[in-house]
Image (spheres, coloured by chain):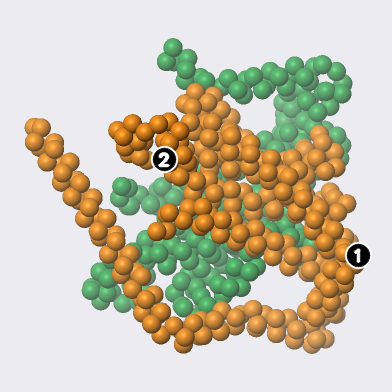
């Protein structure tokens, strides 16, 4: 009884899969949308073997990682400057808050007119997606250092930079990792999403658009699964990394 | 033994009181500088007000200077006054209102449906252990699929009409709301429920005075995040497939190379995003006012 109840989570997915395959084998109209699962597996095999899947996957992933590196690097820098200097805070913060209100997709037409429809525009969108959460979390992490810690640092006469290195930065690290986690998620999402709006090039989003144009639901599903799994894997990696880096923290 | 246990609990109670006192004093200390600021408010307020305005004014001035410098054609770097003129033209012709109302209509319907489903699903999973065991794994699985990535698949199934936009907005809303509701219900401190049990309050009172107030704040912030996310999804969908709406207006401006039109769209999507977020925050503060007392 106890062992059986552990498998309750599998009931719904299995039921859904069974419903799906029952619908897919009813008639041609149904099998167009509820594409037989064996077709999805077959097309996965085919696209894996002819290298199409890995080629597109790599292209999306490379754009994600370079955009993430650019966006989060600049984001950490801007967030730290805002946290350290009151003047920079007053200068940048209103602008940041104003620009952030525009949904990411809203910038796409403007970017396409100013910077063209190529790969660099896609990279810009991905960098922007990683930039926003990084600025906010770095800034808030650094600002919200506990007053007690800062008092201790001033008692020990640590000085500005050593306070930053030994007190403020370690206490901001959890928040910075939260930012990194959001940044990877947004970068991946916008990397795939940006492919819908600009010139076709290699990438999972583009693979999906081609599949849609060719009415191949199996390939669309395959792309969705690849995007979901990759996003999950990236999130898992960042979480692991943050656990390693924050090991020194006493978890209460 | 018994003494030790009770002694321990008394001690921990004392520690708790001390901790809460400490946090109270640190809160007092943190609010100290603010009161000091309030003492010479006029000067400080004036100064911060000016510096906050500084960067937008600089940006506007830089934009104005750049557009009139002749470095770029005015079709590419459109002067701000031309963008304002375009905005005014669109208001007078009613184009803007038409696009705005179709976008906001889609958002309202999709968000309403999505939030309803999300609240039901989330609280159901949070309240019933069985529902959690059956539904939660699948829910977590579906949550991994970003809405943007579902657009092509949904277009294949639902076509390019109104339905697909509303379904996408509803999907983008339902999952974060469900998660917030689930975690809100799950996160009610055990102590609250224990106290409620000790006082033997009626189930209805228990629900309205204990469970609901404890879950409202996290659920509201989840709903706020869902709102801005679904606004982004809607704008993106309208860029791809629409015959009306702010996104479609911008996409048209892109195709006919009217950067002024696109800039009007950028500003308007930003203003709407800001207004939605801000009004939700105000609502949050009103509804959970007891928290700030």
Q: Which residue is mark 2?
A: B210
Residue at the image point whose x is 71% and y is 19% from the top: A19
Asked if residue B162 lies left or right of residue A96, the reply is right
Res A66 quadrant in image: bottom right
The answer to whether one can see residue B98 in this image is yes
Residue A225 versus residue B165: which sits nearer the camera? Answer: B165
Q: Which quarter shows the C terminus of chain B?
A: bottom left
Q: Label 1, secondary structure: give it.
A: loop
Residue B123, how many percent across, how many down? Answer: 53, 35
Residue A97, how many percent across, how many down? Answer: 59, 68
Query: In the rendered image, what is the letter of the chain coloured orange?
Result: B
Res A118 quadrant in image: bottom right
Distance between mark 2 and mark 1 Cα atoms = 57 Å
Residue A8, how many percent across, how many down? Answer: 52, 20
Q: Which residue is mark 1?
A: B256
| Rendering colour (chain A) | green
Residue at the image point whose x is 61% and y is 38% from the top: B118
Chain letter behind tag 1: B
Pointer 2 or 1: first along the chain: 2
Chain letter behind tag 2: B
Q: Residues within 10 Å of mark 2 (few under 14, many from 20)?
A: some
């Amino acid at each position: 009884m106890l062992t059986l109840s552990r498998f309750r989570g599998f009931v719904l997915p299995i039921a859904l899969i069974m419903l799906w395959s029952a619908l897919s084998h009813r008639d041609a109209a149904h099998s167009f949308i509820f594409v037989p699962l064996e077709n999805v597996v077959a097309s996965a095999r085919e696209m894996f073997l002819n290298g199409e899947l890995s080629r597109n996957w790599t292209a999306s992933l490379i754009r994600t990682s370079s955009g993430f590196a650019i966006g989060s690097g600049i984001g950490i820098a801007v967030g730290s400057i805002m946290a350290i200097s009151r003047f920079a805070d007053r200068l940048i913060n209103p602008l940041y808050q104003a620009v952030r209100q525009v949904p990411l997709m809203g910038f796409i037409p403007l970017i396409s007119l100013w910077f063209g429809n190529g790969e660099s525009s896609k990279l810009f969108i991905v960098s922007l997606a990683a930039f926003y959460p990084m600025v906010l979390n770095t800034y808030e992490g650094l600002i919200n250092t506990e007053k007690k810690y800062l008092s201790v640092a001033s008692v020990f006469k640590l000085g500005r930079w050593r306070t930053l290195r030994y007190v403020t930065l370690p206490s901001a690290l959890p928040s910075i990792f939260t930012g990194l986690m959001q940044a990877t998620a947004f970068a991946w999402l916008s990397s795939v999403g940006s492919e819908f709006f600009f010139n076709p090039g290699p990438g999972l989003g583009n693979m999906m658009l081609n599949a849609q144009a060719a009415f191949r639901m199996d390939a669309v599903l395959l792309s969705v699964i690849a995007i979901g799994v990759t996003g999950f894997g990236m999130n898992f990696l960042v979480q692991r990394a943050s656990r390693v880096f924050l090991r020194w923290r006493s978890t209460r | 033994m018994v003494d030790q246990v009770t002694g321990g609990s008394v001690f921990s109670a004392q520690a708790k009181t001390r901790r809460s006192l400490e946090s109270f004093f640190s809160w007092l200390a943190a609010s100290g500088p603010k009161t000091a600021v309030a003492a010479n408010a006029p000067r400080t307020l004036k100064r911060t007000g000016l510096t906050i305005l500084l960067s937008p004014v600089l940006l506007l001035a830089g934009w104005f200077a750049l557009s009139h410098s002749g470095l770029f054609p005015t079709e590419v770097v459109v002067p701000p006054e031309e963008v304002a003129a375009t905005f005014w033209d669109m208001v007078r012709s009613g184009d803007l209102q038409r696009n705005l109302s179709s976008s906001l209509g889609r958002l309202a319907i999709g968000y309403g449906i999505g939030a309803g489903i999300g609240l039901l699903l989330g609280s159901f999973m949070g309240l019933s252990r069985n529902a959690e065991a059956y539904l939660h794994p699948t829910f977590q699985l579906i949550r991994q699929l970003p809405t943007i990535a579902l657009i092509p698949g949904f277009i294949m199934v639902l076509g390019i009409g109104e339905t697909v936009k509303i379904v996408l907005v509803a999907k983008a809303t339902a999952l974060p709301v469900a998660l917030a509701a689930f975690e809100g219900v799950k996160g009610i401190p055990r102590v609250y429920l224990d106290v409620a049990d000790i006082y033997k309050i009626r189930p209805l009172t228990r629900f309205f005075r204990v469970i609901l107030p404890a879950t409202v704040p996290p659920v509201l912030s989840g709903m706020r995040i869902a709102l801005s996310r679904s606004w982004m999804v809607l704008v993106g969908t309208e860029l791809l497939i629409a015959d009306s709406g702010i996104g479609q207006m911008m996409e048209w401006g892109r195709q006919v190379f009217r950067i002024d039109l696109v800039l009007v769209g950028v500003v308007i999507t930003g203003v709407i995003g800001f207004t939605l977020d801000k009004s939700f925050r105000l609502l949050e503060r009103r509804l959970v006012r007891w928290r700030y007392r």
